[in-house]
Amino acid sequence: MIPALPPPAVIQSHAAHAEAANSGAVVYSWEGEYAGRSGNVTATLPITNPKLGPNANHTNVEICAQGPNGAMVEVGVIKDPSDGSGLAGPHLFATYWVGGQLKDYQTYGAVANGSASFTLIYWNGSWVAKVGSRDLLKSPESLWGGKFTSGTVQTQQAFSEHQSVRGDGTGFIRGRVTWSTSHATAFGGATPHAGWFQIN
């Protein structure tokens, strides 16, 4: 069971578009973000069903591994009724990015509130996105010309994010997170509430 915790600090936010300074603009916001530097990434993430505001795009919680030249793989839980999944509530997703561009976005079905273990592992020439023991997405290293492997990971992250209009009531996916790296540090200018993120 995920305990009720006070909200973590918002670590950073930035405009999704140049016009974000105007009222009503959609912006990205993150909280509880931690970053480390090593190959594979594993974390137990909370799964909740927060409110989406009337103009919100999504709210999600994820882990990711970033490599050189905009290479990235992600896996987690997202609430995005407009992503083509046909699901209004939280559901699994996995992506890969090449050259800073999203190249594949897959969704995998609804999930119940609670928590789940997610892994990004470089194995047998591919990045594999997993939930529990289930493989969700395999992305071969050839997508990045062999230049994005566990040895070239520059940053690994775990965080909660939403894309919405400020003040529209969109909530973050919150709860206790356990991340299995000993070298993680708070990312950004503020440290999240200690109860949100537990590092092993």
Image (tube, rainbow, N blue to C red):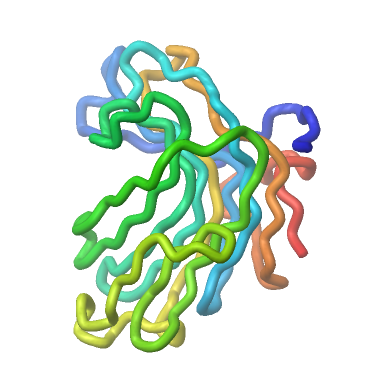
Above or below residue 142? Residue 95 is above
Above or below residue 7? Residue 199 is below
Above or below residue 122? Residue 97 is above
**x 44%, y 45%: residue:** 92
Residue 114 in which image quadrant: top right
Left/right of residue 185 with respect to residue 26 in the rendered view:
right
Left/right of residue 24 with respect to residue 179 in the rendered view:
left
Above or below residue 1? Residue 25 is above
Residue 125 in which image quadrant: bottom left
Work out whether residue 169 or residue 192 is closer to the camera in this orientation and state it: 169
Q: Position of residue 170 (x, y in %)?
A: 47, 20
Work out whether residue 132 or residue 34 is closer to the camera in this orientation and state it: 132
**x 22%, y 55%: residue:** 102
Viewer can see residue 190: no
**x 29%, y 69%: residue:** 71
- Image quadrant holding the N terminus, namely top right
**x 27%, y 51%: residue:** 105
Work out whether residue 97 or residue 118 is closer to the camera in this orientation and state it: 118
Q: Position of residue 117 (x, y in %)?
A: 62, 57
